[in-house]
Image: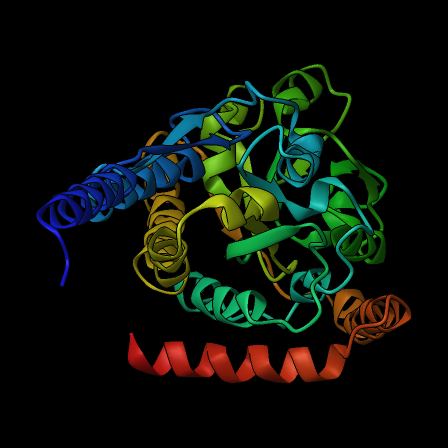
Amino acid sequence: MISRYGLVCALIAIFAACGLTSANAQQVYELKASVYTPASNPLARAMEQWASLIKDKSNGRLVIKVFPGGQMGPPPRQFDLARSGVADIAVVLHGLTPGRFPLVELAHVPGVLSSNAYASSLALSEVWVDLPKSDHPGVKVLNVQCIVPMPVISRSELTKWSDLKGKRVRAAGSVQSSVLEALGAVPTLVQPGDLNDALDKGMIEAASIGYSGIASYHLTDAGKFIGEGDLGGVTFATVMNEGAFKKLPADLQKLLDDSSRGEGAQLFAKMLADDEVGYRTKMKAEGIKVSTLPTDASLQDAAGKIRADAIARAKAAGFDAEAVLAKLRAAIQKYEATK
């Protein structure tokens, strides 16, 4: 039989263990999230709302502190900030480092994504978070978003795509550079924060960028004309340092995983898509001329080669490009049918 002394010791041990478990359950984990866009941009606003959602769902145990406006590093360094652990989470614009993400660049080719940006974003998230081999090594992909189709803001009026011929146009990545070259333009890589100055001083004549980007970087100060058409899309990824993820307890890991596939992905997708529509409407009301440009024959002829080149680059990097494209098309159709 257990002695009275032994029973007391056992009870003390049990209570101590319960207290320790309770303390662990209440431990607060804080993550740093880097966003290169200004706080007013939908990417930064979506991150703030997602952080609030995560905090509520974790009962305050998981806190994501958001640093917008490139406070933690310039736009091209966002992926490395997360990969190295300087930031726990970061938002990456793939086109700012051309060639580094050959698989996701497939989605930049004209005709791959649907004009339904919300459905395309949800499809991208679904496919990329489950990839057996990722083109985002060293990080966990939480979601992938897109802007499609990409407008072009110009200093001079656009009535047809050939109006860009011979002009320096900011391209949002290597695939879009190929698209602009097919139109006779001179593609130029300009970082988002430098766009206003470059357009204002005539260093570039036009820029391919989403309506939310046009608003965030005040590009209507210099560009009063916008052309729309299928120049392909651009993609963004919310990524997390793998080590930071593994340090979280299992229930918080599951919370992040579930959110990546659910409310979090929907929040980012909806805010991006809604802001594109809202800013477009606002700019037209302010007198910015928005024109739908007819499909250019030279672009149609080049689209097949651009796609083939993108597939070849992805294959050379060891990815099953056709299988990924097939999954992406199926996912887009699914989300278009369910919206």
In percent of width and height, residue 138 lies at 69, 50
Instruction: Determine if residue 151 is in view.
Output: no
Q: Nearer the viewer, residue 284 or 39?
A: 39
| Rendering coords of residue 185 (x, y %) | 82, 45
| Image-based side of 30 in relation to 196, left or right | left
Measuring from the top left, give residue 333's x and y in whole percent: 45, 82
Looking at the image, which residue is at 67% across and 48% down?
Answer: 94
Q: Is residue 288 above or below residue 327?
A: above
Quarter that holds the N terminus: bottom left
The foreground one among 174 and 313 is 313
Residue at the limit of the structure toward the left, as seen here: 4
**Image check: 198 left or right of 278?**
right
The image shows residue 50 at horizontal and vertical percentages of 32, 43
Q: Quadrant of residue 321?
A: bottom right
Q: Inspect this view and state whether residue 337 appears.
A: yes
Q: Is residue 121 above or below residue 176?
A: below
Residue at (63% x, 85% y) in the render: 326
Q: Nearer the viewer, residue 303 or 160?
A: 303
Q: Residue at x 33, y 56 (%)?
A: 251
